[in-house]
Every structure is written in structure tokens, then in C-alpha cells.
Image (cartoon, rainbow, N blue to C red):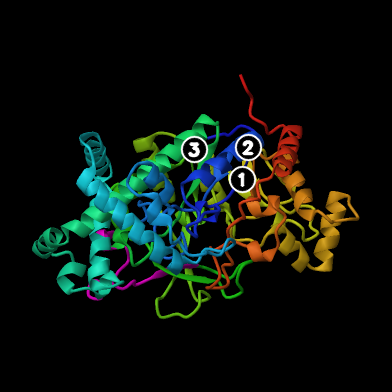
């Protein structure tokens, strides 16, 4: 699929200002969409919306929504909570998410709203709840049961009672009746998330903003997805532990590679099932976003596998995947969909051929471009039109932080390419470079628009702590910032065409 010339901003919803310690789907989200529309942007790119502890790429359910994103203020406006419920809120860090503190405050509020809904929902609300349950049944029943079991038996499903871990039918049904209140609550949370997100997405679409959302290539071992679909993952039948795990070889982010630890897919079994689970996953994500970004796309062609006893990713190997057959099946079942791909890292001719076979635009990252090689594929002079350009991604440092850490050789290359002796506003120089390029789409992280340093970095793949916590302050989206971005967007032909 081909996309019109346009631009947008990369920002995860957890980054919004909020009195509840974490960004949510409340009024600041709508204010951000207004900012996008008023600055002539056409895209809002997010990270996965799935529930987990902190990392949005490590989730308890790949098709579920994160309850911590539910807005208590929206629940209050619907009569499910009251102003008095917010009277004793603690002070939260305005620039970082304190996840454990947030859970201690938000989950009791959500439980109260769930009980209120259970007792007081009118017939129309009950009907909508049932309709959501029917629509999401292919993942919701297993997910809600998994979360109820997780609270009852502990954190990891492969350590539960054998009859539950192995999903013995009689045992599951007995516990399903016993845990009915807990199962209802988790279904209610998903219903409320779906309702609030759908309202926000509709508002964005009315403002002519489309949402780009991620579909991570892998899912967490400790998830409803693996527990309920063990046959499509490489697991030991006796222990339910992975026989092979996922990662990447040594790359820009880590000299020893990245050992993710996710179980890899049993592609043979998936293919026997006509990739049913993957088709349902694409279909579910498309309910929440307008454009899918396939994360780690190269694993659809060949993926890096590591033995589970290894302590780093160095001693892995490449194994081919039936990506073309999978994507053909998705296209046959769902039609041609707006898909972009993350084609960074160790990319081969075969990966590029698979990408181009389906006309998926790939990514260019300016922070990778300045090694002095005029043929570098990430230098704008070498771009095709059919691609997306980023100043940096959620895995990169901010542009200011990156530039401060760059070598003098790299800084000289940047100055020479820009034709500048001064780099006082290097973030705006790279924003200008991205917007002025021939790439069909340009996506700018909000941190770069705000001119923030390394403290605002969203994720550093080489470290395990301090990631995914950044938030912007409530006074960040100024009229001056809006107007400067609008002018630059219009100047370089990326403003929407108004009829």
C-alpha cells in the first residue's frame, strides 16, 4: 500500500500528563490530538497497548488493552466513580511513571467502577458489554481466565497446578465457575478500555489523524497467548519451557546481541492451521489502529534462535520463516491493509524482497545515517519515496542526547550534510531534514520536538531498568511549538489537503 506525503508524532499514551501518575485515555489525550491537528500532522504513532508490568512489548495478552490506560476521570463522568474517590490522591512524579505506585492507586478505583457497573448498568450498557464479549471472544475468554488464575496461583502459568497449566477441561470449568467474579472484572476492564480507546480513536479520525500501532513479532512466555495456544510455540511438553528462544545477533544496540527470551513459533503448526492465530491478531489490532507497524519484520523471513541455556544471544542461528505464506493468508482473509514494517538491524536481500513483494514501506532513521558514507541508505539523498523517516525511534536516544554522545567525526559529517557550522538546535535541524526529505511519511518523537536530552529517552535496549517511564509535563504543548511545527510541515508539503 502507498501512503500520501504526510507527517506525524511518536508518543505512547503512558507519556501523557495525568494526576494519576500515568498517561491515560482522558482529557490530555484529546488535547494531544488537538495539538496534532492544529500543527497539520496526520499520524499519531504509539507503542503496543497491551497489558504488562512496564514494557509494552512484554504483555500478559497480545490482543488485550492495558487497564492502566483507562481514565478514572472518564469513569467519573459516566457515573461509575465520584469526585470524592480522588480526594486523597498522592503526589506523583510528573516526569516519570512510578508503575507500582500507580497500580496501588488505580486498580482499587477500577475495581470500584467495575462493581458499580456490575450492579447498576442499565439494559443498554449490559447489551454493549455482551456485544463486546461476543466480538472479542476468540481472545477475551482465555485472557480473563488467565488473569484470574494469575491472581489466584501466582505469576507464571507454567508453575501453576499441572491440570491448570495443561488446561485440563474439567479442572478449567470448575475453576471458571469458582472465579466468576474475577473473570467478570477482567472482562469489564477490557470492555472499558475498548470503549475509551474507541472514543479517542474516533475523535482522532474526525480530526483527520490516523493512528499507527505496533504488532510485536513475539509474545511473552508468561501470557494468555502461550498458555492457551501452546501447540503453536516451541515448548517442551513436560515442562512448558521454551526449547528455543528469540533474540537478535550483535547489532547497533548491543555488542552481545539481544536475548529476549520469548518462545519462538512452531511455524509448521501455524501453517497447518492456515495461520489462524496470526490472522486473528492482525484483525484485532486493526480494530484499535488505522495503520499497523510490524515490529522486527525481518523475523517473518528468518529469525534468530538461541538455546534457552545460553546467557547471551551471540551463539544463535538464523532459521527461515514462512513469512510470505503468512502475509498472503492475512491478505486473503482481511484484504490489503495499511501496513508499514520495521526493517532495521541485520537486513538481507531476502528480507527486502519480502517487504517489497507486499509493497510495505520500510523505515529510515537519521541517527544511523552519519558515518561519512555518501551511499548510506539512511541519508536522505538515498531515500526512495516509499518509506518512513524518523529522527529516532523509541529505542534510540533523543536527538539531543544522541548528538552529545556522537564522535567528533560523526558531528563533522552531520554539520557537512546540513551545511551548518552551528548545531545549537540540532533537534530542529534533523526534524527539518526529515520533513524536507522525499520519504512519503516523516515521524518525529515528541521528545525531539520538545528538545529534550537523554533523560527523556523512552527505551534503551541494552539496559533492563529505567525504561518506558518518561512523561511530558502539562505545559509542554505550547502555541509556539504548535506553530513552528505547523509552519515546517506546511513548508515541506506534508500538510493535509482540505477540501
Say whether marks 2 and 3 touch (CB < 8 Å). no
Disc 2, SS: loop
First along the sequence among labels 2 and 3? 2
Residue 106 seen anywhere in this rendered image of the structure: yes
Task: Quadrant for the C terminus, please.
Answer: top right
Determine if the magenta segment contains residue 305: no
In this picture, residue 151 sits left or right of residue 330: left
First along the sequence among labels 3 and 1? 1
The disc at residue 338 is 3
Please provide percent x and percent y for residue 171.
Answer: 11, 65
Magenta: main secondary structure: loop
Instruction: Name the residue that disc number 2 marks.
Output: 41
Q: Point out the stretch of residues depicted in magenta.
A: 227-247
Could you tell me how far apart the alpha carbons at marks 2 and 3 are, in whole angstroms?
18 Å
Disc 3, SS: loop
First along the sequence among labels 2 and 1? 1
Amino acid at each position: 500500500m502507498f501512503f500520501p506525503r504526510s507527517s506525524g508524532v511518536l508518543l505512547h499514551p503512558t507519556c501523557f500528563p495525568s494526576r494519576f501518575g500515568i498517561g491515560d485515555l482522558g482529557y490530555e489525550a484529546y488535547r494531544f490530538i488537538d495539538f496534532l491537528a492544529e500543527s497539520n500532522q496526520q499520524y499519531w504513532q504509539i507503542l503496543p497497548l497491551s497489558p504488562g508490568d512496564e514494557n509494552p512489548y512484554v504483555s500478559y495478552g497480545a490482543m488485550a488493552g492495558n487497564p492502566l490506560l483507562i481514565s478514572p476521570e472518564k469513569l467519573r463522568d459516566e457515573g461509575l466513580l465520584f469526585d470524592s474517590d480522588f480526594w486523597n490522591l498522592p503526589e506523583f512524579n510528573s516526569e516519570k511513571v512510578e508503575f507500582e505506585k500507580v497500580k496501588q492507586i488505580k486498580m482499587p478505583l477500577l475495581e470500584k467502577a467495575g462493581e458499580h457497573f456490575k450492579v447498576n448498568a442499565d439494559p443498554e450498557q449490559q447489551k454493549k458489554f455482551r456485544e463486546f464479549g461476543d466480538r472479542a471472544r476468540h481472545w477475551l475468554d482465555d485472557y480473563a481466565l488467565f488473569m484470574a488464575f494469575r491472581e489466584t496461583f501466582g505469576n507464571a502459568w507454567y508453575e501453576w497446578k499441572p491440570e491448570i497449566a495443561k488446561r485440563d477441561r474439567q479442572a478449567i470449568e470448575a475453576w471458571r465457575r469458582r472465579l466468576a467474579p474475577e473473570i467478570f472484572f477482567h472482562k469489564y476492564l477490557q470492555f472499558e478500555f475498548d470503549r475509551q480507546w474507541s472514543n479517542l480513536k474516533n475523535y482522532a479520525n474526525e480530526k483527520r489523524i490516523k493512528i499507527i500501532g505496533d504488532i510485536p513479532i513475539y509474545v511473552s512466555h508468561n501470557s494468555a497467548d502461550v498458555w492457551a495456544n501452546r501447540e503453536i510455540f516451541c515448548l517442551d511438553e513436560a515442562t512448558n519451557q521454551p526449547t528455543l528462544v528469540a533474540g537478535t545477533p550483535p547489532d547497533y544496540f548491543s555488542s552481545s546481541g539481544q536475548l529476549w527470551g520469548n518462545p519462538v513459533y512452531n511455524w509448521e503448526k501455524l501453517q497447518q492451521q492456515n495461520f489462524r492465530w496470526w490472522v486473528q491478531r492482525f484483525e484485532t489490532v486493526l480494530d484499535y489502529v488505522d495503520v499497523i507497524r510490524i515490529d522486527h519484520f525481518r523475523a517473518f523471513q528468518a529469525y534468530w534462535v538461541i538455546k534457552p541455556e545460553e546467557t547471551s544471544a551471540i551463539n544463535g542461528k538464523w532459521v527461515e520463516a514462512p513469512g510470505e505464506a503468512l502475509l498472503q493468508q492475512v491478505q486473503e482473509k482481511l484484504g490489503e491493509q495499511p501496513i508499514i514494517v520495521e526493517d532495521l538491524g541485520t537486513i538481507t536481500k531476502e528480507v527486502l524482497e519480502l517487504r517489497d513483494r507486499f509493497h510495505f514501506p520500510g523505515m529510515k532513521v537519521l541517527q544511523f545515517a552519519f558515518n561519512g558514507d555518501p551511499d548510506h541508505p539512511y541519508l536522505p539523498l538515498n531515500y526512495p519515496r516509499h518509506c518512513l523517516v524518523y529522527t529516532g525511534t523509541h529505542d534510540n536516544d533523543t536527538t539531543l542526547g544522541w548528538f552529545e554522545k556522537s564522535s567528533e567525526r560523526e558531528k563533522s559529517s552531520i554539520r557537512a550534510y546540513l551545511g551548518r557550522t552551528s548545531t545549537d538546535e540540532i533537534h530542529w535541524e534533523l526534524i527539518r531534514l526529515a520533513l524536507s526529505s522525499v520519504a512519503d511519511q516523516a515521524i518525529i518523537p515528541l521528545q525531539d520536538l520538545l528538545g529534550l536530552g537523554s533523560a527523556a529517552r523512552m527505551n534503551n535496549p541494552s539496559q533492563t531498568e529505567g525504561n518506558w517511564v518518561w512523561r511530558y509535563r502539562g505545559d509542554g504543548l505550547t502555541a509556539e511549538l504548535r506553530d513552528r511545527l505547523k509552519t515546517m510541515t506546511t513548508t515541506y508539503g506534508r500538510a493535509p489537503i482540505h477540501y
